[in-house]
Each structure stands twice: as structure tokens, then as C-alpha cells.
């Protein structure tokens, strides 16, 4: 530090930062910053004494009547003193003389600038300025210096942290992918085990129906021939409730057939949903994919939620059907959640408010519309046709800030930081299928997702 002979200006000081471990978003103010400000009227010999006593000091902030005018680095200062007659020209002259020769372009950044951003800007400077310190300011009239060497060390530390985070995230994603694949194989096996007995029941229902019909005809023939059956037979008919059995047996068989059909469809839908896609896309019926997902969600689609299918004439679409089924599941699940929450709020409002005050609630509805669109009707490349799948709900809609957060999650940076079901859906549609994934929402009106897929 300075001795008393140089006490006519504030001696240099070192700010150690906040002392916390660096992170991906750490700003410049978390690093070691040097404070050393002098007026241009001070002599070069005074600054030389300060540099001699503070070997780590990267430079000096120059002021003129208290206002920031520039900076001279230690390297520049020494280079000019070592020039021929440099000592006579600059050492015993005011700093303004030296600064008139050593004036260079400065990199001045706010203290809140992320270290990664600052390092990238510093490395884009010309070669002769790469070693120059950076001027950091926190508020008016408060300027500090950052040693470029310390900035580089912090930058590469953060890069190492970023690499580690990406590695751990990739490992977690691989584990999650393997878990999902194992779960898919498990569910596929269970669905297969369900289909076996269901197929057995379904295959024998035809025979049971035929046998029962023959037996009923035989009983009717006996009743026609035996106008006065013995008392034992009459008692047995009464105990067995024969008339009721004759009427109810066809209905019972029809109910068994309906249940077996529903169970067969459910198991098939599970198999399709858990299907592991091939390396190359294959033609698929999108309507079948949508119907399978709606069947899987049937337990959540209460009687209050109405499903409207506006299916157009769609050709088979070349796609990864398993991944598209996941996209449909994500969108429909979000729609169901929004409608259920809205229905609960409406019920609470009706319960605690006078019914006459509130408008009649709108019936929750999910509308699915599919069609083939020519390119000229869409903002896409011409020369091809596109399949459009729109899934809209009349729920509460999204607030502007929620809408913006979802759109931001579609970017690579946000998706890498935190992958959501909708960001994953966006990646599947755009990256895997070369399509478009659009979101429109209005608060109080509803939300609409549009999936556009090219017809190859």
C-alpha cells in the first residue's frame, strides 16, 4: 500500500468479490477488482511508486476534476518509460502528457455483466489489446479494474462447470431414457399378457352366443310341446327364474363382448403408445394415434369434458408414430389439466356465491381438427402439402408471462437448462419431423396448439 508521502490520493484497494463459488451466471462483481483512481495532474513518478509497491495492480483509472476520462495499464506505463528518453518525458510530467500518447480503446462493462459474456467480448479485441485490463463500473463515478488473467481463469473455471453440468445432464437424460424404454417394454409386455386371455374370451364368445341361442330354442320347443309339464319342472323353472334368464342371457353375452372389445382396444393402445420407433419413419394413421391417446385418457375425461373430433381426410403420414403419440399425450394432458382446474374453480364459485350473480359456466371442451393444407395457405416452403393437427380447449388460457415462458422454453438454451413436456414436443415436431409447432393462447378464451407435418 502507499506510504504517507503519497497520501494525497486514495491508495489502491482490492475487492475480493462475494467469496462464493462461481456459477454459469456469475457476474464480474464476483471477481477480484482493483480500485485505484487518480487525477491527470499527478506526476508519473507517483504512479511508478504505486506500481512498484503493488506488483499485482493492473493499471490506474484516470480522472479529470473527478470525472472518468480513461485508464492506463501497468504494461503501457512501463513500455512508455522504457522508450528512448521515456523517463525524462513522462516520469516527472503530469499523467495527462503520458495519456496523450497512450490513449487506447477501452472495454468498459457494468459489474452485473456475466463473466462468460465479458470474456467473450474481451477476446474479440485486437491482438495488441488482449492483455489490457477491463474497466468495471458499479455506479456513477465508481470505476474498478479487472485483470485479464483473472478473467481468463474464471472463464475457464465456468466452462469446466458448464461441461460438467452438461455431462451430468446427459447422463441423467440417458438414465431417464433407459428407464422410459424399460417401462415401455414392461407395459408392452403387460398389454401383450392382457391381450392373450382377452383374445381367448373374444374367440369363444361366438361359440357361447351360438350355444346359448340353440339352448334357448330347445327350451322354447320343449315348452311348446309340454303344455302341462310336471310339477318338479315347474318348481325348477321358478327357482331358476327361467323367464328372466331367457331375457337377460343375450344382454349378458353382449356386455361381455363389449367389455372384451374395450379391454382389447385399451391393451392395443398401450402397445402402440409404448411402441419403440424404428430408425426410419413409417406411414401412420394420425387419427388412430389420436383415438388411442384419448382412450388412454378416458379415466380423466370426465363427463363434463366434451371431445369434438373434426377429422378430415388424411393420407398416411410418414412419421415416428411413437414420438408423435407422446406429443399428442403431452398436449391433451395439459388441456385436460386446464379444464379440470377451471371446472373446480367454477364449482367453488357457484358454491360460495349466489347463482344469479354468475354467468352460466361454459361446458369444458377439447376440439381436435385435422386437415390437409396446401403450402400457399401456410407460411411454409412451397411445393408440398402439409397435414395440420389443431388441438384447442376453451379453458382459462395463459397469461402473457406464462405464454412467453413457454415460447422461450422452445429455444435450445432454455430447453437445455430445463426440458419440459412442451419443449420436448416442440423438438420432436420440428427437429425429428421437419414440421412446425405453434402455440396460441388468450387469457379467458382458451389455448390452441397447431402441429404442421410435411407430406413427403
Image (cartoon, grey):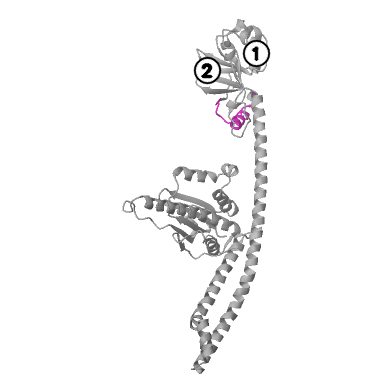
Quadrant position of the N terminus in the picture: top right
Identity of the residue drawn at 50% across and 14% down? 66
Element marked by disc 2 = strand
> Taking the image as drawn, is residue 451 in sight?
no
Q: Quadrant of residue 266?
A: bottom right
Foreground: 435 or 339?
Answer: 339
Locate residue 95 relative to residue 312 in the image: left or right.
right
Element marked by disc 1 = helix
Which residues lie in the magenta part?
109-128
Q: Earlier in the sequence, mark 2 or mark 1?
A: 1
Q: Position of residue 25 (x, y in %)?
A: 59, 33
Identity of the residue drawn at 66% across and 59% down? 186
Q: Quadrant of residue 130?
A: top right
Q: Position of residue 385 (x, y in %)?
A: 52, 59
Question: Which label is found at residue 68?
Answer: 2
Foreground: 86 or 119?
Answer: 119
Foreground: 369 or 125?
Answer: 369
Q: Are marks 2 and 1 in contact (CB under 8 Å)?
A: no
CA distance separating discs 2 and 1: 20 Å
Q: Is residue 120 magenta?
A: yes
Foreground: 298 or 47?
Answer: 298
Q: Which residue is mark 1?
A: 51
Amino acid at each position: 500500500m502507499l506510504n504517507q508521502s503519497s497520501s494525497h490520493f486514495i491508495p489502491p484497494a482490492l475487492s475480493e468479490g462475494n467469496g462464493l463459488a462461481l456459477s454459469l451466471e456469475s457476474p464480474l462483481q464476483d471477481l477480484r477488482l482493483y480500485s485505484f483512481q487518480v487525477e491527470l495532474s499527478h506526476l508519473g513518478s507517483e504512479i511508478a511508486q504505486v506500481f512498484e509497491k503493488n506488483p499485482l495492480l493492473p493499471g490506474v483509472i484516470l480522472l479529470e476534476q473527478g470525472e472518468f476520462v480513461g485508464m492506463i495499464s501497468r504494461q503501457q506505463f512501463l513500455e512508455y518509460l522504457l522508450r528512448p528518453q521515456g523517463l525524462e518525458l513522462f516520469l516527472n510530467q503530469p499523467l495527462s502528457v503520458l495519456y496523450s500518447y497512450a490513449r487506447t480503446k477501452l472495454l468498459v462493462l457494468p459489474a452485473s455483466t456475466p463473466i462468460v459474456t465479458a470474456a467473450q467480448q474481451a477476446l474479440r479485441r485486437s491482438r495488441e489489446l488482449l492483455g489490457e485490463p477491463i474497466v468495471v463500473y458499479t455506479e456513477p463515478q465508481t470505476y474498478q479494474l479487472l485483470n485479464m488473467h483473472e478473467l481468463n481463469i474464471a472463464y475457464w473455471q465456468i466452462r469446466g462447470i458448464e461441461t460438467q453440468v452438461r455431462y451430468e445432464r446427459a447422463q441423467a437424460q440417458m438414465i431417464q431414457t433407459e428407464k422410459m424404454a424399460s417401462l415401455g417394454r414392461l407395459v408392452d409386455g403387460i398389454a401383450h399378457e392382457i391381450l392373450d386371455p382377452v383374445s381367448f374370451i373374444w374367440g369363444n364368445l361366438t361359440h357361447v352366443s351360438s350355444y346359448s341361442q340353440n339352448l334357448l330354442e330347445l327350451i322354447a320347443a320343449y315348452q311348446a310341446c309340454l303344455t302341462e309339464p310336471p310339477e318338479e319342472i315347474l318348481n325348477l323353472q321358478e327357482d331358476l327364474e327361467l323367464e328372466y334368464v331367457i331375457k337377460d342371457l343375450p344382454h349378458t353375452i353382449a356386455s361381455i363382448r363389449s367389455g372384451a372389445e374395450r379391454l382389447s382396444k385399451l391393451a392395443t393402445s398401450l402397445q402402440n403408445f409404448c411402441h419403440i420407433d424404428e430408425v426410419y419413419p413409417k406411414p401412420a394413421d394420425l387419427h388412430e394415434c389420436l383415438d388411442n391417446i384419448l382412450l388412454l385418457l378416458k379415466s380423466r375425461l370426465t363427463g363434463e369434458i366434451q371431445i369434438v373430433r373434426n377429422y378430415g381426410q388424411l393420407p398416411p403420414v410418414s412419421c415416428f408414430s411413437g414420438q408423435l403419440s407422446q406429443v399428442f399425450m403431452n398436449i391433451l394432458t395439459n388441456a385436460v389439466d386446464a379444464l379440470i382446474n377451471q371446472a373446480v374453480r367454477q364449482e367453488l364459485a357457484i358454491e360460495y356465491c349466489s347463482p344469479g350473480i354468475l354467468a352460466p359456466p361454459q361446458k369444458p371442451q377439447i376440439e381436435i381438427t385435422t386437415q390437409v393444407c396446401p403450402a400457399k395457405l401456410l407460411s411454409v416452403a412451397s411445393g408440398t402439402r402439409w397435414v395440420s393437427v389443431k388441438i384447442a380447449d376453451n379453458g382459462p388460457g395463459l397469461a402473457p408471462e406464462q405464454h412467453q415462458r413457454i415460447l422461450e422454453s422452445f429455444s435450445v438454451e432454455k430447453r437445455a437448462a430445463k426440458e419440459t413436456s412442451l419443449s420436448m414436443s416442440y423438438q420432436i415436431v420440428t427437429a425429428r419431423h421437419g414440421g412446425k409447432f405453434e402455440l396460441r393462447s388468450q387469457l379467458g378464451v382458451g389455448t390452441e396448439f397447431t402441429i404442421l407435418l410435411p407430406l413427403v
